């Protein structure tokens, strides 16, 4: 064999060895699909359906956060635990205290100043006096609260486009929480005990039975075939 051929063969072997010893590059996780600029959410409640139109440009961080919460089922079986005539109805504390605590530990930053006033029918994240304190609590304005709330940076992210009559028919007899001078649920007790506390002490409250993004519907996530087979096998054994 000629010297040139021997060198060429040696180089080819070296390249093959190098390729075999380089670890395989991990495939990047697929990016989640973008959240729509506008979307509709249907609340199936104990008094009827409420349809909410969400506008990303009103409150970008709030709109995205609400989408995540709804699509993950957070608001299913949530009570309208703070319902005050002529003011607001509020929800956003999960029936399972562990779930509430998990999301409370991950507040979102504040959005820019209001683009929309807190008029009747608008939907807004609640917050404390601390900066960047929005978590899961949301309220629907029952009346025009722009004068009271806009200056405090409560930023609407959506509006009720159908079912405002349902909102006004939700049970409001308990009023504000006991800590605020009303006879409604104490939020600390609700955070610790979940829906069991409400069902025992405040049986007349209304609930969101199910919250669903309906337009456009979220993309269906398909699991790998191997995972699906294992899941089916486990279910059969049960």
Image (cartoon, helix red, strand yellow):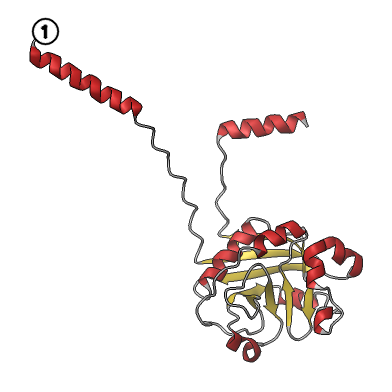
Q: Residues within 10 Å of mark 1 (few under 14, many from 20)?
A: few
Q: Left or right: 134 with respect to 49?
A: left
Label 1 sits on residue: 1
Which residue is rendered at x = 29% and y = 27% of the image? Answer: 18
Residue 1 lies in what quarter of the image? Answer: top left
216 to the left or right of 51: left
Which x, y percent locates residue 133? 61, 73
The image quadrant of residue 63 is: bottom right
Q: Mark yes or no: residue 174 visible.
A: yes
Q: Quadrant of the C terminus?
A: top right
- Taking the spot 64% from the left edge, 31% from the top edge, the residue there is 230
| Residue 136 falls left or right of residue 209 | left
Furthest residue toward top: 1
Q: Is residue 207 visible?
A: no
Q: Residue at x 62, y 34 (%)?
A: 228
Residue 216 at x, y = what percent?
55, 59
Q: How many marks?
A: 1
Quadrant in the picture for residue 49: bottom right
Indicate whether 223 appears above or below 129.
Answer: above
Residue 177 in the image, given as x and y percentages of width and height: 81, 78
Taking depth in this image into account, of 126 and 209 the one nearest to the observer is 126
């Amino acid at each position: 064999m000629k010297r040139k051929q021997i060198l060429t063969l040696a180089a080819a072997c070296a390249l093959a060895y190098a390729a075999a010893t380089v670890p395989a590059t991990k495939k990047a996780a697929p990016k989640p699909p973008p959240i729509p600029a506008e979307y509709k959410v249907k609340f199936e409640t104990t008094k009827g359906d409420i349809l909410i139109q969400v506008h990303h440009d009103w409150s970008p961080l709030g709109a995205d956060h609400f989408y995540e919460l709804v699509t993950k089922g957070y608001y299913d079986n949530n009570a309208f635990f703070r319902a005050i005539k002529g003011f607001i109805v509020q929800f956003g504390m999960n029936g399972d205290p562990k779930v509430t605590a998990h999301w409370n530990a991950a507040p979102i930053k504040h959005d820019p100043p209001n683009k929309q006033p807190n008029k009747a029918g608008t939907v807004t994240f609640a917050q404390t006096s601390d900066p960047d304190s929005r978590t899961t609590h949301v309220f629907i304005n029952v009346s025009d609260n722009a004068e009271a709330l806009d200056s405090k940076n409560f930023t609407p992210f959506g509006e009720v486009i159908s079912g405002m009559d349902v909102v006004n028919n939700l049970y409001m007899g308990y009023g504000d929480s006991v800590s605020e001078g009303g006879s409604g649920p104490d939020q600390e007790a609700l955070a610790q005990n979940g829906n069991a506390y409400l069902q025992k002490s405040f049986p007349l409250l209304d609930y969101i039975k199910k919250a669903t993004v309906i337009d456009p519907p979220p993309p269906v996530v398909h699991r790998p075939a191997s995972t699906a087979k294992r899941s089916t096998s486990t279910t059969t054994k049960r």
